[in-house]
Structure formats: C-alpha cells, structure tokens
Image: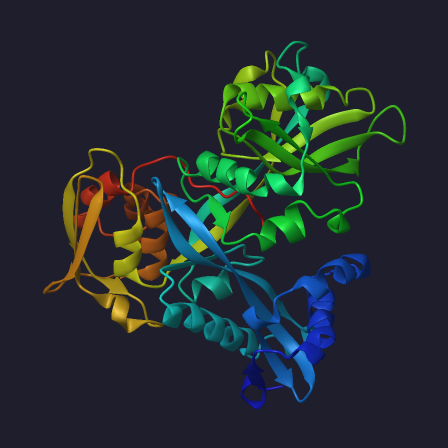
Amino acid sequence: MAAVSLTIRVPEESERDTVGDVLQVSLNLDPARRAGRLFRMPLKDFRVAFDGNKAVATAAEFRFLQWFAGRAIPMSGIFGVATLPEHRGGGVMRQVLSSLIAKAYDRGTPITALYPAVLGPYRSLGYEMAGTFNEHRLRIDAIPAGIGDASAVREYMPTDLPSVRACWSRAMRDATGTIEPDGDAWWTDRTFDPKMDPTLRAVVVPGLEGDGIEAFASFTRTPATGTLEVAFGLECQPLAAVTERGLRALLAYVRGYRGLGQWVQWVGAPNDATAMLIPEHGVLHHWRYPWMLRLLHVDEALRARGWPAGARAQVVFAVEDPMFPENAGPWRLSVADGKAEVARVDGGDLKPIAIGTLSAMFSGHLRPHDAVRVGLMDVDDPAVGSFATLFAGPDPWTGFFF
C-alpha cells in the first residue's frame, strides 16, 4: 500500500492496543512483555501511521541528557520503530521517523540518537554510528575473597532515588556519549519496578557518613549453564559506582551468590576498569552493539558540547544536510577555555561534510583521520587537524539500551 494513503499522527488512548499490535508483530515482543510495558508507554511521544483505524507503523522518543566531555546535551532517543511486514518498502517508516525527528528539531533539541536494527534507512535520515553499548561478564568464582565489604550493601528503597540519580550522573559525566534519563519515570517504571521482572532486585552502597549513594545496581536473574539446572546469572541494568569502596562492596556482595550464581553482567565503557580489580582473566566482553547519532542543530550542539581540557582551535566548515538545510553553514567553530563560539561565515568553495560524518566525529567515535582514510573527508581538508584536536577523547558508549 502506498505510504501517501496513510495518516501519521499522535495516537489516542483508545488506540493503545493497535499500537501494541504493531510492536508485538514487528519487534517480536512476547505477550508477557507487551502486557507489562504497553500500558506505561507515553503515547504523546509516539508518531503512528494509521490505515483507517489500524496502526501499521510506529516510532517514539525518550528524553535524555547525553554527556560529552563533561557537559550534558538534551537528546531525543528514538525507540519503538516498527512497521507491519505488509507495509514495508513503501516509505511509510521514513515518513513516521521524519515526523518524529522534525518534532524534536522544532522543539530545539540539539541531537538525536537510536539503536538501529539496520543501518541504511537511518543513514538516509542523517544518522551515523557514533558509539557502542558494551556488556561485560565476570565469572562470580573469579571474584577474590576480601575484595570489599559486602555488609556496606543494603536494599534499595524508593527514598534513595534522588541519591541514586545523583550517583548515576556523577559516574556518567566524565565519560563520552553516556546518557541520563530526563526525569524519574525511567527509574521508577523500568529500573526499579519489579513488575518489569519478578526476579528484579536492587541494592545500594550508602556513603560512610550516611549522606548520598556511592554505588548501586539493579539486576535480574537469568538461567545459566551450571552443574544444576537452577544455575543463574545476574544481569545488571544498570550498575554504577563513583568510589573504589562502593565498587568493591558491590563485587563482594555479588560474590555471595557464588555456587548457583555463575556470572554477573553489567554495561560499561569498552575498556571498563572493573577488570583491574580481578586478579585473573575473569572479565569478558560479552556483547557489543552500535548506536547512531544525528546532530539536529549543528550550531547549538557544538555550543553545548564539552571540549578537551586545554584544547584551542578554530575551524571553518560546511555541512550537507538535505533534511535541515539550515545546518549547511558555512560555520566557524572557535574553541578556547572549554567553550565554543559558533558563527555563520562566508565559506567560499568549501566541500561540505555529510551530517552523518560530522555526527560520528562529534561523538568521538569516528576519528577525523579515519574519515579521510575511508573517503568521508578529503586528505587536504584543513578541518581534519582541527577536528582531531577538538573531538579527541575516550571511546563513546551508553549505559542504557532503549
């Protein structure tokens, strides 16, 4: 069916079930998971294509803050991208996503990110791979005795939420690409709600003075290979620690599950430092998946971003962005003392950089010299050296899969 015959709009409450039908069929959402999540989904943040009263394609957004070099930028996190099989290939999803992206653009949100099932459709909308989601797995029997004080760990209580959010923010702000939910709902409805999984348990490590949280973890049990069929692993989503004491206490607590407990899994940086506390080679990189980024407002994203300490550079560049021509520039970016000034200038005959390429360099995932090596920038482009200085930093990653 041609996409032009469909209506794209925000769904009404009475249409929640037909939206759920699309998600269940397209994303292989099992009925139990659908029942647990569908009633929580904020329909106001959806865009849905309807064929009469039937939903045929969906997409939605979460509001996040995303950290880059010590500064957080408002980000639109795209999720729930789904199309019924009989409506694929006609351009309907492009229209739905374009409507949602335009909403974020009009709101002034500087950047948008997503996890792709495939790359091509999102690249055509200006997204590019910009970082990774990394799951690490540690054998519980590899955690040494005496690694920390397990008695410092206690059960999470709802009154801990402000301190837990502060702990997460402190842990994420020094990384690149990490995200922070904008509001309490993500934490109350997902991270700490046992309705999401009856095996869910959450623990915290309070500060020594009883003020604040040094570390926390929310985890579920999943079947694992072991001597007995009741063996399990612990999947943390999330885990964060801002002190050595807090991290060691969590590891000591996890060690208490040894026997039936086979492993503990958490999300962290590609080179997560937890392995430095384990005497043998017990931490494995279990799973890695890319996320994609798109700059919606080039000038505002650059002004909002943090920059490497001591970095000073000026660069003039142009951008190719068919979806939002206002991003074309040319732009002059001047960075000094951790702040950026961005202004439109006369760029002459500058060869524009594709918005996806700029987005991947912005996150630090694509090194400018690698952009040259794969033909995304010209070797003689004077912007290469300046971008290499300004976008230098640790590999970008995120702590939540959405």
- State the residue at coordinates (27%, 66%): 327
Side of 131 relative to 194 (left or right): left
- State the residue at coordinates (66%, 53%): 189
Residue sticking out furthest to the top: 146
- State the residue at coordinates (54%, 20%): 208
Q: How is the image coloured?
A: rainbow
Placement of the N terminus among the 4 image quadrants = bottom right
- State the residue at coordinates (47%, 41%): 397
Residue 188 against residue 86 in the figure, above or below? above
Q: As rendered, which of 228 and 354 lies closer to the eye?
A: 228
Q: Position of residue 229 (x, y in %)?
A: 90, 31
Residue 27 against residue 237 in the figure, above or below? below
Residue 143 against residue 16 in the figure, above or below? above
Quarter-of-image position of residue 47: bottom right
Can residue 400 be seen from the camera position used here? yes
Side of 212 relative to 31 (left or right): left
Quarter-of-image position of residue 323: bottom left
Q: Position of residue 366 (x, y in %)?
A: 36, 45
Q: Position of residue 147 (x, y in %)?
A: 62, 13
Q: Position of residue 382 (x, y in %)?
A: 15, 48
Side of 126 relative to 156 (left or right): left
Q: As rendered, which of 402 and 248 lies closer to the eye?
A: 248
Can residue 402 be seen from the camera position used here? no
Count of residue discs: 0
